Image (tube, rainbow, N blue to C red):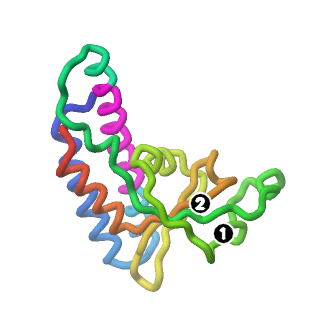
Amino acid sequence: MILDGYWKQDLRQIKFSLVFWSKMGFGDFAEHQISRNLLYSAAIIRKIAEDEKDAEGVTKSNQMMIPPLPIIKMSVPVRRYQHTNPDMFFMNTRVFLSDYDMEHAESENIRIAQICNQIIHSFAWAVVHQGRRIYGVLFASDREKEKNIFYFTLEDWISTIKAVIDTSAI
C-alpha cells in the first residue's frame, strides 16, 4: 500500500505542471511534459485505487469498519469515438483517426481505474491542440483500440487529480 504523503505532493506538482504546460503553448517539449505528467499521474492514481480496493477486501473479510474509499468509485468524463473499420488492425498495426467516427462522440463517465489502465497501456496517444493551446488527449489501450478511442480534456483530468488529492486517504 502507498500510505506515505509524498504521492499527494507528487500529484500537486503534476497538477501545477499540467496547468502550466497546457497554457504555455504547443511545442515538442510542452507535449512531452503533458504526456509525461498524464502517464505519471495515471500510474499514481491507479495504485491508489488498487490499494483502496485491496483495503476494502481485507476489511470486509475481517468484518472491520473502514472510512469511505472514494477513489475506486470516482469516474472521469470522457468522449468515446467508435472504431469504424474492423478489418484495419489485421492489415496494419497503426492507428488512424480516419478509422474512427470522429463526428459522433458519446459522452460518458468512466471509472478512474479503467481510464488509468487505458492511459498506462495506451497504444494510441495524441495530444490535441489548436494553435498554441493544448486542450486534451486522445488515447486507447492496445485492447480497446479496435473498438474505441477516448478523449478527455486536460481540465477534466486536472479536476480529477484535485479530487484525488482532496479525498484520498494517503
Compared with 31, 118 (above or below) is above
Q: Quadrant of the C terminus?
A: top left
Residue 44 in sight: no
- For label 1, the residue is 97
| Residue 15 x/y as whole percent | 26, 60
Residue 2: percent from the left, percent from the top? 25, 32
Q: Quadrant of residue 37?
A: bottom left
Q: Vertical placement of 102 versus 130: above or below?
A: above
Determine which quarter of the picture holds residue 63. top left
User: Do callouts 1 and 2 mark residues in contact (Cβ within 8 Å)?
Assistant: yes
The rendered magenta stretch, by its main secondary structure, is classed as: helix
Under circle 1, the secondary element is helix
Pick the front one: 59 or 164: 59
Quadrant of the frame with the N terminus: top left
Residue pictured at 62% horizontal, 73% vertical: 102
Q: CA distance from mark 1 to mark 2?
A: 9 Å
For residue 149, what is the image quadrant?
A: bottom right
Q: Amino acid at mark 2?
A: Ile
Q: Which residue sits at x=20%, y=50%?
A: 165
In x, y percent, where is residue 155?
33, 68
First along the sequence among labels 1 and 2: 1
Q: Amino acid at mark 1?
A: Leu
Please provide the residue range marked out in magenta: 37-56
Front-most of residues 76 and 155: 76
**Residue topped by disc 2:** 149
Residue 114's mark? none
Q: Residues within 10 Å of mark 1 (few under 14, many from 20)?
A: some
Residue drawn at point x = 38 percent, y = 43 percent = 43
Residue 80 in the image, given as x and y percentages of width and height: 55, 63
Residue 160 inside the magenta-drawn segment: no
Q: Residue at x 21, y 43 (%)?
A: 168
